[in-house]
Image (cartoon, grey):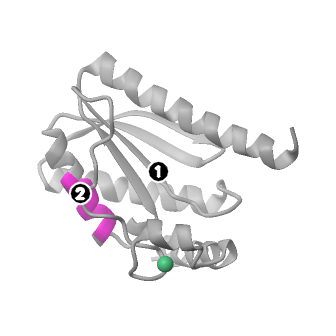
Amino acid sequence: MNEIEAIQNQILQAKEIRWIKQHKFKREHKSTIISFKFNIPSWPKNSNEIEKAFKKSRFGFCSYMKNNHQELTFLEQNETILGPEVFFLAKGDPEKVKKLSIKFEESYTVGRLLDIDVLGPHSDQHIERGTKRKCYLCDKIAIHCMREENHTPIELRLFFDTLLKNFVKE
Ligand SMILES: [Zn+2]
């Protein structure tokens, strides 16, 4: 196995562990479980700046949900090869929780950098977005830009870092 394959393996493993954890929490609590993290292009996925921005947006998300009458309970926070991630338990209707999460992703300063997955108590799959996500850099559909390779990893990372830097300073 070469170095790239080894890293790809670690990424897959981290995603698998995240998925297993979210399902374990769902079974344990019989509730909706939210997985909240950044979608970080390229490397590194852990830094002081990322950590600061993560704390700030985690707080922003909890306040936003509270203002919309959704009480979240903190379950666990981890630092993985993919960056920081946190799990919350939500008591409200899963569809409503997902809709609010999408609104947050679309309206918050660094919302487009966030990836918020909602798993309902009676489902084995994350709730679908309904509308497709928009790209970081342009207003096209994100998956389209990824497939067409419209932006280089360096461009994406530069955008991510700049947005994060300004956000942390705010
Ligand atoms: Zn794009």
Whether label 2 touches label 1, CB < 8 Å: no
CA gap between label 2 and label 1 equals 20 Å
> Residue at 88% of width from left, 44% of height from top?
2
Res 152 label: none
Mark yes or no: residue 53 visible: yes
Is the CB–ligand 1 distance for label 1 below 8 Å?
A: no
Query: Could you tell me which quadrant the C terminus lies in?
Result: bottom left
The residue where tag 1 is placed is 37
Q: Quadrant of residue 158?
A: bottom right
- In this orientation, which residue lies closer to the viewer: 86 or 41? 41
What secondary structure is found at the residue carrying circle 2? loop
Q: Quadrant of residue 129?
A: bottom left
The residue where tag 2 is placed is 130
Tell me which amino acid carries mark 2.
Gly
Q: Which residues are magenta?
A: 99-106
Name the chief secondary structure element in magenta: helix
Q: How many numbered discs, if any?
A: 2
Tell me which amino acid carries mark 1.
Lys
> Residue at 38% of width from left, 81% of height from top?
139
- What x and y, as percent, mark residue 66? 19, 50
